[in-house]
Amino acid sequence: DTGVSQDPRHKITKRGQNVTFRCDPISEHNRLYWYRQTLGQGPEFLTYFQNEAQLEKSRLLSDRFSAERPKGSFSTLEIQRTEQGDSAMYLCASSQGSGSNQPQHFGDGTRLSIL
Amino acid sequence: GENVEQHPSTLSVQEGDSAVIKCTYSDSASNYFPWYKQELGKRPQLIIDIRSNVGEKKDQRIAVTLNKTAKHFSLHITETQPEDSAVYFCAASFGSGNTGKLIFGQGTTLQVKP
């Protein structure tokens, strides 16, 4: 399978703990996006990478959230001091090209549950 | 602000009928409008998209229309089948700097009754 892969699929943790998620985009896709989806809602943009550069972050993203894409391939999203409100599905998407109008392909997501 | 409104929130049709979902967007600079289908517990799946230089696009039973003046676009599904039942999301690209950030609508739950 050469699609977007995310790990882990599920994460259950206690409030206050740190968690880290990984996303492997489609090979050679230079653009990588993180979104968050809560039940009954559409995905909500979190952050965007072009190659290794993080070029945009949502204003809704608190300083407890950090993302990296060190070599322009896989990306990690870390949440520090997790809160109940962080419970959601975290989705990664990737696309290829120089324009903003390229198809984004999503992974299966990591479902985070905060106890 | 960055906003996409989607209607209706739920839609129930008989098998074989057509279904139409409508979206409006706030930023006239948006230039890309994809539609995603999401089944329960699965990833959003891109089913069709349209760019701002095109008014209509069709792929078998699915079509999308775009009215840039009105900032409005729609998904049309003809000859619906039970397997079309899912949540459908529209989205629009937003933001300066060519990021391709997508803002999604609230979703439409489509139920196709056999």
Image (cartoon, rainbow, N blue to C red):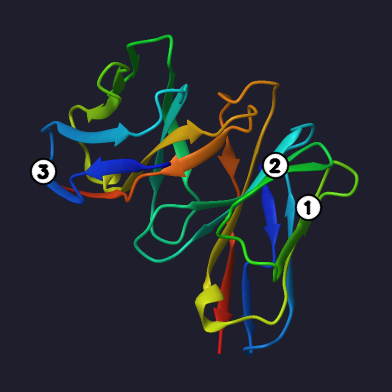
Q: Which mark is residue A75?
A: 1
Is residue B113 visible in the rendered image? The answer is no
**At which x and y percent is residue A100?**
60, 26
The residue type indicated by label 3 comes to: Val
Instruction: Judge the density around disc 3: few (<14), some (14-19), many (≥20) Cα neighbours within 10 Å.
Output: some
Q: Is residue A19 above or below residue A73?
A: below
Residue at screen point 49% across, 32% down: B93
Q: Which residue is mark 2?
A: A32
The residue type indicated by label 2 comes to: Leu
Relative placement, left or right, of B107 versus A86 is left
Q: What is the quadrant of the N terminus of chain B in the image?
A: top left
Q: Are marks 2 and 3 in contact (CB under 8 Å)?
A: no
Circle 2 — which element? strand
**Of the residues under marks 2 and 1, which one precedes in the sequence?**
2
Which residue is more in the foreground, B15 or A108? A108
Relative placement, left or right, of B79 versus A41 is left
Residue at screen point 34% across, 33% down: B25
Instruction: Judge the density around disc 1: few (<14), some (14-19), many (≥20) Cα neighbours within 10 Å.
Output: many
Q: How many marks?
A: 3
Relative placement, left or right, of A13 versus A66 is left
Q: Are marks 2 and 1 in contact (CB under 8 Å)?
A: yes
**At which x and y percent is residue B77?**
23, 30
Relative placement, left or right, of A69 versus A108 is right
Instruction: Judge the density around disc 2: few (<14), some (14-19), many (≥20) Cα neighbours within 10 Å.
Output: many
For the residues labelled 2 and 3, the Cα–Cα distance comes to 36 Å
Which residue is more in the foreground, B80 or A72? A72
